[in-house]
Amino acid sequence: MNARDKLQAAYELAFFPPRLHKTWTNIRRNETVNPEITGELLKMALALHQALPEYGYASHRALKRLALYQANARLLGTVSFLKNILSYLGEEFTPPATVPPQWVRDIGLPEFRGQDNHSSLLTRHFQPC
């Protein structure tokens, strides 16, 4: 998985509730294919909820999109959920003060439709065989 794929997967975990729910279900059922990468992606997802950077980001449009994603995720308690999952996994993590500027990219999320109707990098790379 390259850096772009990891960032896409982290955005989906941070801001696409069905992906986070599916990941949590796999963790609870001990069906996580790659626990190390899953832990890393969960940490990245939590870092994406930190304060926005003042400089170094890709574009103003990307910054606005990330701000919108953050605001919408607050309605669902995503930050607490991510912290609780990391705690469940025994992962120690202190998020950075701001989102790393190189992570502020204009990344789209899958369309939010019915159950099991969402294909993404996380699904393709982390489903049990």
Image (spheres, rainbow, N blue to C red):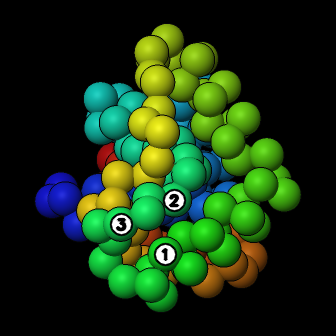
What type is the residue that disc 3 sits on?
Tyr
Q: CA distance from mark 2 to mark 1?
A: 8 Å
Circle 2 packing at 10 Å, graded few (<14), some (14-19), many (20+), is some
What type is the residue that disc 1 sits on?
Leu
- Choose the circle earlier in sequence order: 1 or 3: 3
Which secondary structure, mark 3? Answer: loop
Residue at the spot 35% in from the left edge and 66% down from the top edge: 55
Residue at the spot 66% in from the left edge and 74% down from the top edge: 68
Q: Residue furthest left?
A: 2
Q: Which residue is mark 2?
A: 52
Circle 1 packing at 10 Å, graded few (<14), some (14-19), many (20+), is many
Picture coordinates of residue 83 (x, y %)? 62, 29
Residue at the spot 54% in from the left edge and 25% down from the top edge: 86
Q: Which residue is mark 1?
A: 63
Residues tagged 2 and 1 counted as in contact (Cβ below 8 A): yes
Picture coordinates of residue 94 (x, y %)? 46, 24
Q: Which image quadrant for residue 60? A: bottom left
Q: Which residue is mark 3?
A: 55
Residues tagged 1 and 3 counted as in contact (Cβ below 8 A): no
